Image: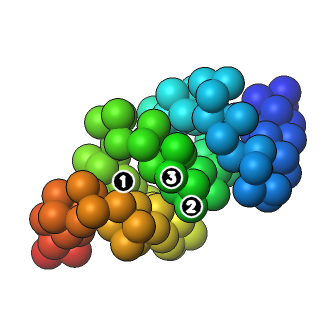
Amino acid sequence: MGKKDALTAMFNLCLNHANKARVVDAGIVPLVQLLLKDKRIRMLDEALSMFLLLATHPQGRHEIGKLSFIGMLVDIIRDGTPKNKECAASVLLELSLNNLSYSCSTSVWCLRAFS
């Protein structure tokens, strides 16, 4: 339960736009990715929500861009629950709308996910 509480606290801090850069600087992006990968933790919705929030900040998008992340989102869209699919699609949309380097590659992945 400690991980969920910690992620909830970070999420609440990030509701203030200025705190997003601080949280990214503190190294949260790779940690949240670990939550996505570990199925035993069962925090997929929370991790996706955090990524969605971080994707609204340029520094967050930059750090997310360093990850092998798009394929994971596509897998979630294919195999996840309806809520997981919605969250993953929202993250992809946010990344592709606000980051030119993601637009082409994200579009290709999205086409693969929905075909």
Picture quarter with the C terminus = bottom left
Indicate whether 70 appears above or below 3.
below
Could you say where residue 70 lies in the image, as x and y percent from the top left? 30, 50
Q: Which residue is mark 2?
A: 56
Q: Secondary structure at mark 3?
A: helix
Q: Amino acid at mark 3?
A: Pro
Residue beneath the point at 27% across and 63% down: 100
Q: Is residue 95 left or right of residue 110?
A: right
Q: Is residue 46 left or right of residue 82?
A: right
Q: Secondary structure at mark 2?
A: loop
Residue beneath the point at 86% across and 41% down: 9
Q: Amino acid at mark 2?
A: Thr
Indicate whether 25 appears above or below 47.
above
Indicate whether 103 appears above or below 55.
below
* Mark 3 crowdedness (10 Å alpha carbons): few <14, some 14-19, many ≥20: some
Q: Secondary structure at mark 1?
A: helix
Q: Are marks 1 and 3 in contact (CB under 8 Å)?
A: no
Q: Which residue is mark 1?
A: 73
* Mark 2 crowdedness (10 Å alpha carbons): few <14, some 14-19, many ≥20: some
Residue beneath the point at 67% across and 24% down: 26
Could you say where residue 54 lies in the image, as x and y percent from the top left? 59, 51
Mark 1 / mark 2, whichever is N-terminal: 2
Choose between 52 and 21: the one closer to the eye: 21
Q: Which residue is mark 3?
A: 58
Mark 1 / mark 3, whichever is N-terminal: 3
Choose between 101 and 90: the one closer to the eye: 101
| Number of the label disc, if any, that sits on residue 64 | none
Place residue 68 in its image quadrant. top left
